Image (cartoon, helix red, strand yellow):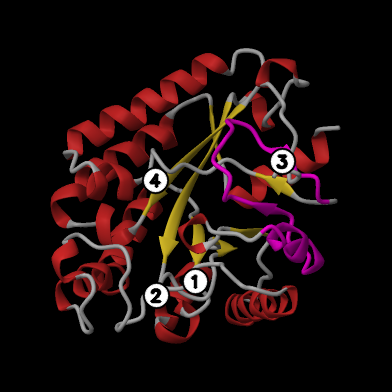
Amino acid sequence: MDNELFAYSPITERPPVKWPGGARVACYVGVNIEHYQVDRPSTSIFTGTAGLAPDPLNYGWRDYGPRVGIWRLAESLDRHGIRASVMLNSAVCAHYPQIIEAGRARDWAWVAHGRDNSTFQTHSSAEEERAYLADVVGTIERATGRRPRGWLGPALTETFRTPALLAELGLGYVLDWCNDDQPYRLNVPGMLSVPYSIEVNDITLFAGRNLSGPEFVRIVSDQLDQLYADSADSGRVMALVLHPFISSQPFRHKYVDQVLERLANHPAVWLATSDEIAEHYATTQP
Protein backbone atom coordinates (compact mmCIF):
# COMPACT_ATOMS: atom_id res chain seq x y z
CA MET A 1 0.00 0.00 0.00
CA ASP A 2 1.05 3.60 -0.50
CA ASN A 3 2.15 5.62 2.51
CA GLU A 4 -0.66 8.02 3.37
CA LEU A 5 0.84 9.34 6.63
CA PHE A 6 3.20 11.84 4.99
CA ALA A 7 4.16 13.02 1.52
CA TYR A 8 7.59 13.11 -0.09
CA SER A 9 9.29 16.46 0.53
CA PRO A 10 12.90 16.99 -0.62
CA ILE A 11 14.76 19.10 1.92
CA THR A 12 16.04 21.33 -0.90
CA GLU A 13 12.54 22.61 -1.72
CA ARG A 14 11.29 23.79 1.69
CA PRO A 15 11.02 27.24 3.25
CA PRO A 16 14.03 27.97 5.49
CA VAL A 17 13.79 26.86 9.10
CA LYS A 18 15.02 29.45 11.61
CA TRP A 19 15.86 28.57 15.19
CA PRO A 20 15.84 31.02 18.14
CA GLY A 21 18.82 33.30 18.64
CA GLY A 22 20.25 32.63 15.20
CA ALA A 23 21.18 29.04 16.08
CA ARG A 24 21.74 26.71 13.16
CA VAL A 25 21.28 23.31 14.81
CA ALA A 26 18.52 22.54 17.31
CA CYS A 27 19.74 19.70 19.51
CA TYR A 28 17.95 17.64 22.14
CA VAL A 29 19.23 14.85 24.36
CA GLY A 30 16.72 12.02 24.34
CA VAL A 31 17.04 9.94 27.52
CA ASN A 32 15.13 6.67 27.39
CA ILE A 33 13.89 5.77 30.87
CA GLU A 34 12.24 2.40 30.56
CA HIS A 35 10.74 -0.52 32.46
CA TYR A 36 11.20 -4.10 31.33
CA GLN A 37 9.09 -7.08 32.38
CA VAL A 38 11.15 -9.70 34.18
CA ASP A 39 9.58 -12.66 32.38
CA ARG A 40 9.73 -11.41 28.75
CA PRO A 41 12.66 -11.13 26.33
CA SER A 42 13.80 -7.68 25.26
CA THR A 43 16.95 -5.74 24.35
CA SER A 44 19.82 -8.07 25.22
CA ILE A 45 23.60 -8.04 25.38
CA PHE A 46 23.77 -11.87 25.12
CA THR A 47 21.11 -13.60 23.02
CA GLY A 48 21.93 -17.05 24.38
CA THR A 49 19.81 -16.52 27.50
CA ALA A 50 17.33 -13.97 26.12
CA GLY A 51 14.47 -16.48 25.95
CA LEU A 52 14.76 -17.59 29.57
CA ALA A 53 12.47 -16.45 32.39
CA PRO A 54 14.00 -15.14 34.48
CA ASP A 55 17.03 -14.02 32.52
CA PRO A 56 19.35 -12.52 35.16
CA LEU A 57 22.12 -11.73 32.69
CA ASN A 58 20.12 -9.51 30.33
CA TYR A 59 17.49 -8.27 32.78
CA GLY A 60 20.19 -7.23 35.22
CA TRP A 61 22.08 -5.43 32.43
CA ARG A 62 18.94 -3.42 31.61
CA ASP A 63 18.08 -2.87 35.28
CA TYR A 64 21.37 -1.02 35.80
CA GLY A 65 19.70 1.98 34.16
CA PRO A 66 17.14 2.95 36.81
CA ARG A 67 19.28 1.75 39.72
CA VAL A 68 22.57 3.46 38.86
CA GLY A 69 22.91 4.77 35.33
CA ILE A 70 20.24 7.48 35.35
CA TRP A 71 21.77 9.10 38.42
CA ARG A 72 25.23 9.26 36.86
CA LEU A 73 23.74 10.73 33.66
CA ALA A 74 21.63 13.25 35.60
CA GLU A 75 24.80 14.62 37.22
CA SER A 76 26.36 15.18 33.79
CA LEU A 77 23.25 16.82 32.40
CA ASP A 78 23.12 19.11 35.43
CA ARG A 79 26.80 20.01 35.08
CA HIS A 80 26.30 21.11 31.49
CA GLY A 81 22.93 22.79 32.00
CA ILE A 82 21.03 20.38 29.75
CA ARG A 83 17.35 19.52 30.22
CA ALA A 84 16.61 15.97 29.18
CA SER A 85 13.84 15.00 26.81
CA VAL A 86 12.77 11.82 28.58
CA MET A 87 11.24 8.99 26.56
CA LEU A 88 9.18 7.63 29.45
CA ASN A 89 7.47 4.28 29.81
CA SER A 90 4.39 4.93 31.91
CA ALA A 91 5.23 1.90 34.09
CA VAL A 92 8.28 3.83 35.32
CA CYS A 93 5.92 6.09 37.25
CA ALA A 94 4.92 3.26 39.59
CA HIS A 95 8.17 1.28 39.68
CA TYR A 96 10.76 4.08 39.97
CA PRO A 97 8.99 7.14 41.44
CA GLN A 98 12.31 8.63 42.61
CA ILE A 99 13.27 9.13 38.96
CA ILE A 100 10.03 11.02 38.30
CA GLU A 101 10.70 13.20 41.34
CA ALA A 102 14.25 13.93 40.13
CA GLY A 103 13.00 14.81 36.67
CA ARG A 104 10.31 17.11 37.96
CA ALA A 105 12.89 18.98 40.02
CA ARG A 106 14.97 19.45 36.87
CA ASP A 107 12.04 20.42 34.62
CA TRP A 108 12.71 17.56 32.22
CA ALA A 109 10.40 17.21 29.23
CA TRP A 110 8.32 14.01 29.24
CA VAL A 111 7.65 12.14 25.99
CA ALA A 112 5.22 9.23 26.21
CA HIS A 113 7.02 5.99 25.33
CA GLY A 114 4.39 3.31 25.78
CA ARG A 115 3.63 1.35 28.92
CA ASP A 116 6.87 -0.66 29.08
CA ASN A 117 9.63 -1.63 26.70
CA SER A 118 8.67 -5.28 26.65
CA THR A 119 5.39 -4.46 24.85
CA PHE A 120 5.29 -3.18 21.28
CA GLN A 121 2.57 -1.03 19.71
CA THR A 122 0.64 -3.73 17.83
CA HIS A 123 -3.00 -3.32 18.86
CA SER A 124 -5.55 -5.03 16.65
CA SER A 125 -8.45 -2.57 17.05
CA ALA A 126 -8.85 1.19 17.29
CA GLU A 127 -10.78 0.86 20.55
CA GLU A 128 -8.06 -1.22 22.19
CA GLU A 129 -5.31 1.13 21.04
CA ARG A 130 -7.23 4.26 22.05
CA ALA A 131 -7.69 2.90 25.58
CA TYR A 132 -4.01 1.90 25.78
CA LEU A 133 -2.77 5.31 24.64
CA ALA A 134 -5.13 7.15 26.96
CA ASP A 135 -3.88 5.08 29.90
CA VAL A 136 -0.21 5.73 29.05
CA VAL A 137 -0.70 9.47 28.56
CA GLY A 138 -2.93 9.83 31.63
CA THR A 139 -0.55 7.90 33.87
CA ILE A 140 2.39 10.09 32.87
CA GLU A 141 0.36 13.28 33.31
CA ARG A 142 -0.73 12.31 36.82
CA ALA A 143 2.79 11.37 37.90
CA THR A 144 4.70 14.26 36.34
CA GLY A 145 2.10 17.00 36.56
CA ARG A 146 2.45 17.64 32.83
CA ARG A 147 0.61 16.11 29.90
CA PRO A 148 3.05 14.69 27.34
CA ARG A 149 3.20 16.54 24.03
CA GLY A 150 5.10 13.90 22.08
CA TRP A 151 5.23 10.16 21.50
CA LEU A 152 7.91 7.55 20.84
CA GLY A 153 6.66 4.00 20.47
CA PRO A 154 8.57 1.21 22.23
CA ALA A 155 11.14 0.14 19.61
CA LEU A 156 9.60 2.94 17.47
CA THR A 157 6.47 0.89 16.81
CA GLU A 158 3.15 2.33 15.62
CA THR A 159 -0.03 1.16 13.96
CA PHE A 160 -1.46 3.07 11.00
CA ARG A 161 -3.91 4.64 13.48
CA THR A 162 -1.44 5.77 16.13
CA PRO A 163 -0.75 9.40 15.05
CA ALA A 164 -4.47 10.20 14.66
CA LEU A 165 -5.31 8.65 18.02
CA LEU A 166 -2.50 10.61 19.67
CA ALA A 167 -3.85 13.81 18.09
CA GLU A 168 -7.23 13.03 19.67
CA LEU A 169 -5.44 12.98 23.04
CA GLY A 170 -3.87 16.38 22.41
CA LEU A 171 -0.34 15.28 21.53
CA GLY A 172 1.43 17.19 18.77
CA TYR A 173 4.34 15.12 17.49
CA VAL A 174 5.83 11.66 17.07
CA LEU A 175 9.51 10.64 16.98
CA ASP A 176 9.10 7.25 15.33
CA TRP A 177 9.91 8.16 11.72
CA CYS A 178 13.68 8.71 11.52
CA ASN A 179 13.70 9.97 7.94
CA ASP A 180 14.60 13.67 8.11
CA ASP A 181 16.87 16.35 9.56
CA GLN A 182 13.95 18.77 10.06
CA PRO A 183 10.48 18.49 11.56
CA TYR A 184 7.64 18.12 9.08
CA ARG A 185 3.87 17.93 9.15
CA LEU A 186 2.07 14.61 8.91
CA ASN A 187 -1.17 14.19 7.02
CA VAL A 188 -2.90 14.25 10.41
CA PRO A 189 -4.13 17.70 11.50
CA GLY A 190 -1.94 19.16 14.24
CA MET A 191 0.62 16.35 14.16
CA LEU A 192 4.35 16.67 13.38
CA SER A 193 7.21 14.27 12.91
CA VAL A 194 10.29 15.44 14.83
CA PRO A 195 13.71 13.90 14.03
CA TYR A 196 14.95 11.07 16.24
CA SER A 197 17.98 8.87 15.56
CA ILE A 198 18.43 5.15 15.38
CA GLU A 199 22.12 5.58 14.45
CA VAL A 200 23.36 8.36 16.77
CA ASN A 201 21.96 6.14 19.48
CA ASP A 202 23.91 4.27 22.12
CA ILE A 203 22.01 1.01 21.51
CA THR A 204 23.21 1.00 17.92
CA LEU A 205 26.72 2.33 18.51
CA PHE A 206 27.66 0.67 21.78
CA ALA A 207 25.48 -2.43 22.07
CA GLY A 208 24.97 -3.10 18.36
CA ARG A 209 28.42 -2.28 17.00
CA ASN A 210 30.51 -2.49 20.18
CA LEU A 211 32.25 0.80 19.48
CA SER A 212 34.62 2.37 21.97
CA GLY A 213 34.08 5.62 23.84
CA PRO A 214 36.48 7.63 21.61
CA GLU A 215 34.69 6.30 18.51
CA PHE A 216 31.39 7.44 20.00
CA VAL A 217 32.78 10.95 20.55
CA ARG A 218 34.03 11.08 16.96
CA ILE A 219 30.73 9.92 15.48
CA VAL A 220 28.63 12.39 17.46
CA SER A 221 31.06 15.17 16.57
CA ASP A 222 30.93 14.21 12.89
CA GLN A 223 27.13 14.28 13.02
CA LEU A 224 27.13 17.76 14.51
CA ASP A 225 29.74 19.06 12.07
CA GLN A 226 27.81 17.86 9.02
CA LEU A 227 24.47 19.20 10.25
CA TYR A 228 26.14 22.53 10.98
CA ALA A 229 27.53 22.64 7.45
CA ASP A 230 24.12 21.75 6.01
CA SER A 231 22.38 24.44 8.04
CA ALA A 232 23.89 27.50 6.35
CA ASP A 233 20.54 28.32 4.75
CA SER A 234 18.03 26.34 6.82
CA GLY A 235 18.20 24.94 10.35
CA ARG A 236 18.63 21.29 11.19
CA VAL A 237 17.78 19.06 14.17
CA MET A 238 20.19 16.75 15.96
CA ALA A 239 18.98 14.08 18.36
CA LEU A 240 21.41 12.40 20.75
CA VAL A 241 19.75 9.24 22.04
CA LEU A 242 20.94 7.73 25.32
CA HIS A 243 19.86 4.77 27.45
CA PRO A 244 21.22 4.92 31.03
CA PHE A 245 21.92 1.18 31.18
CA ILE A 246 24.26 1.58 28.19
CA SER A 247 25.73 5.10 28.09
CA SER A 248 26.14 5.35 31.84
CA GLN A 249 28.29 2.28 32.31
CA PRO A 250 31.35 3.54 34.23
CA PHE A 251 33.85 2.91 31.43
CA ARG A 252 31.74 4.87 28.93
CA HIS A 253 30.58 7.74 31.07
CA LYS A 254 33.48 10.14 30.57
CA TYR A 255 33.02 9.97 26.80
CA VAL A 256 29.31 10.71 27.05
CA ASP A 257 30.20 13.63 29.30
CA GLN A 258 32.64 14.91 26.66
CA VAL A 259 29.88 14.84 24.05
CA LEU A 260 27.48 16.71 26.32
CA GLU A 261 30.15 19.32 27.01
CA ARG A 262 30.71 19.92 23.30
CA LEU A 263 26.98 20.29 22.60
CA ALA A 264 26.56 22.66 25.53
CA ASN A 265 29.43 24.89 24.40
CA HIS A 266 28.83 25.00 20.65
CA PRO A 267 27.88 28.59 19.73
CA ALA A 268 25.54 27.58 16.90
CA VAL A 269 23.58 24.94 18.82
CA TRP A 270 20.19 25.62 20.39
CA LEU A 271 20.08 23.12 23.24
CA ALA A 272 16.36 22.49 23.52
CA THR A 273 13.89 19.78 24.33
CA SER A 274 11.95 17.88 21.72
CA ASP A 275 8.84 19.70 23.01
CA GLU A 276 10.45 23.09 22.38
CA ILE A 277 11.62 22.12 18.90
CA ALA A 278 8.15 20.90 17.94
CA GLU A 279 6.45 24.00 19.35
CA HIS A 280 8.84 26.40 17.63
CA TYR A 281 8.44 24.68 14.28
CA ALA A 282 4.65 24.49 14.56
CA THR A 283 4.31 28.18 15.38
CA THR A 284 6.85 29.57 12.87
CA GLN A 285 6.58 27.38 9.77
CA PRO A 286 3.66 27.81 7.34
Q: Residues under labels 3 and 4: Cα distance?
A: 44 Å
Q: Residues under labels 4 and 1: Cα distance?
A: 25 Å
SS at mark 4? loop
Residue occupied by mark 4: 80
* 62 relative to 74 in the view: left or right: left
* 12 relative to 217 in the view: left or right: right
Whether the residues at callouts 2 and 3 have beta carbons within 8 Å, the answer is no
> Which secondary structure dominates the residues rendered in magenta?
loop
Instruction: First in sequence, mark 2 or 4: give its number.
Output: 2
Q: Position of residue 179 (x, y in %)?
A: 57, 35
Q: Nearer the viewer, residue 166 or 148?
A: 166
Q: Residues under labels 1 and 3: Cα distance?
A: 31 Å
Instruction: First in sequence, mark 2 or 1: give its number.
Output: 2
Name the amino acid, label 4. His
Residue occupied by mark 1: 89
Bounds of the magenta span? 160-188
Instruction: First in sequence, mark 1 or 3: give its number.
Output: 3
Q: Residues under labels 2 and 4: Cα distance?
A: 27 Å
Instruction: First in sequence, mark 4 or 1: give its number.
Output: 4
Picture residue at 22% right of the left edge, 41% below the top: 209
Residue occupied by mark 2: 35
Q: Which mark is residue 266?
A: none
Q: Position of residue 128 (x, y in %)?
A: 68, 80
Residue occupied by mark 3: 2
Q: Residues within 10 Å of mark 2 (few under 14, many from 20)?
A: many
Q: Position of residue 162 (x, y in %)?
A: 69, 62
Name the amino acid, label 3. Asp
